[in-house]
Amino acid sequence: MKIVLTGGAGFIGSHLTAFLLNKGHSVIVIDNFITGRRENIEPFIGTGNFDFIEQDVTKFIEISGKVDYVLHFASPASPIDYLKYPIQTMKVGALGTLNTLGLSKKKKAKFLLASTSEVYGDPQVHPQNEDYWGCVNPIGPRGVYDESKRFAEALTMAYHNFHNIDTRIVRIFNTFGPKMRPDDGRVIPTFFMQCLRGESLTIFGSGEQTRSFCYVSDLIEGIYRLMFKDYHYPVNLGNPEEISIKKLAENLSDVTGRKIKIIYKELPVDDPRCRKPDISKARELLSWEPHVDLKNGLRETAKWFKSYLEKAHNE
Ligand code: UDP
C-alpha cells in the first residue's frame, strides 16, 4: 500500500513508519518538526519506499498519484507541548484533520485518526470504555488538546457518515518506549532523565494519581490490526496495568539500579486523577492485547535513554 502518515517524525509516528516499511508498504511522512524530530526519520531516508514532505498539515496537502491509506498522527501530544503550542494544537486537530480527510476523499483512500484517552478528560468512569463520553473542561489548560481531538473524532465520523469515507479512530492511552523526546515533559522521559543525571524526581501532587503505560511495540501492533478492520467507531488501545506515579518512580529506581530522591511539586490544573483503558473491544475485534509488561518496557527504554545521554555527552 501507499500510505500517507502525518506526524511521522514524532515518537509514535516514527515507530509506525518503521513498522509499515518493514511490512513492505511505501510511506510518505508529512511533518513540520514542531514537536517531531529529524533524527527520528533519518534512518528511513534513501531506503527506497520512503518519502518525506516537510509541511504543516493545516495547509492544503498535495500528493501526486494514488494513495491507499491516510494516517493522521500529527499533533503536539504531551501536556507541556500543547501548553506551549495551544493554537497549533487546535489547528492540527481541526484544520489538519479536515485536510487529511479531504485528501482521503480525493484519493478514495482509507483513513485512520490517532485520537487519545484525553477525550475522557478527568474520567468519572473507571476503567474507561469507548461508550463513556468523558469529563473535559473545555476552557482549562488541557482543553486545547482534548477538544481538538474530540472535534477531530466528530469530523471523522461526519466524513464517514456523509461522504462514505472508510475511517477508523484509535484512542491511544499513555505510551512509552525508545525515541520519546527527553524534554517532552511526560512523566517517563522526565523521570529517566532526572534519574540518569542524579537529580531528584519531580512528582506532581501526592503521586497517588494513576496512569496505565503501554509499550510502543504493543501499541503499533494494535494500530496495524485496526487498519484492516471494517470498524468505524473509536477503539481504545493501551495497557490496562494501572500504576500510581509514586509507584512508577519506585519502578524506575529498580530498573536503573539507582537510588532515587523525590521532590513534590504542585499538581497541574485538571491533571486526571486516574486513567486505565477498558480494552475489551480491542481484545474482541482485533484479538489484541499488550504483551510487554511495564518493567520490561522500562528496561528497554532505560537502555535507549542511557545511550541518548552518552551520545549527547560525546558530541
Ligand atoms: N508527572 C509527575 N512528574 C513529572 C511529570 C508528570 O508527577 O515530572 C505526573 C503528571 O502530573 C500526571 C502523570 O505524571 O499525573 C502523567 O503525566 P504525563 O505528562 O506523562 O501524561 P498525562 O497522562 O498527564 O497526559
Image (cartoon, rainbow, N blue to C red):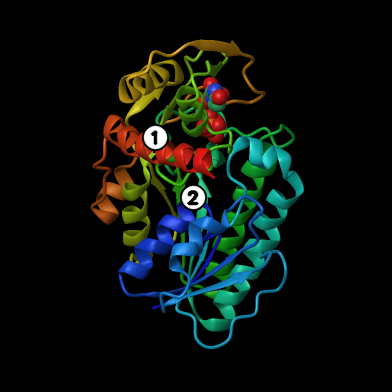
The quadrant of the image that shows the C terminus is: top right
Furthest residue in direction bottom, as rendered = 65
Front label number (1 vs 2): 2
Q: From mark 1 to mark 2, how far is it between C-alphas? A: 15 Å
In the image shown, does 246 or 47 lie closer to the viewer? 47
- Relative to residue 164, is residue 92 depicted above or below? above
In the image shown, does 114 or 213 lie closer to the viewer? 213
| Residue located 46% across and 71% down the image | 166
| Secondary element type, mark 2 | helix
Return the x and y of residue 10 as percentages of the image width and height.
53, 53
- Relative to residue 272, is residue 58 depicted above or below? below
- Mark identifier at residue 213: 1
| Residue located 47% across and 14% down the image | 208
Return the x and y of residue 143 as percentages of the image width and height.
68, 38
In the image shown, does 252 or 16 lie closer to the viewer? 252
The answer to which image quadrant residue 61 occupies is bottom right
Residue at label 2? 11
Determine if the C-beta at disc 1 is less than 8 A from ligand 1: no
The quadrant of the image that shows the N terminus is: bottom left
Visible in this render: residue 231?
Answer: no
| Secondary element type, mark 1 | loop
Q: Quadrant of ligand 1?
A: top right
Visible in this render: residue 270?
Answer: yes
Return the x and y of residue 83 as percentages of the image width and height.
70, 38
- Relative to residue 126, is residue 224 depicted above or below? below
Give the side of residue 59 with respect to residue 164, left or right: right
Amino acid at circle 1: Phe
For marks 1 and 2 on the same chain, the one whose residue lies earlier in the sequence: 2
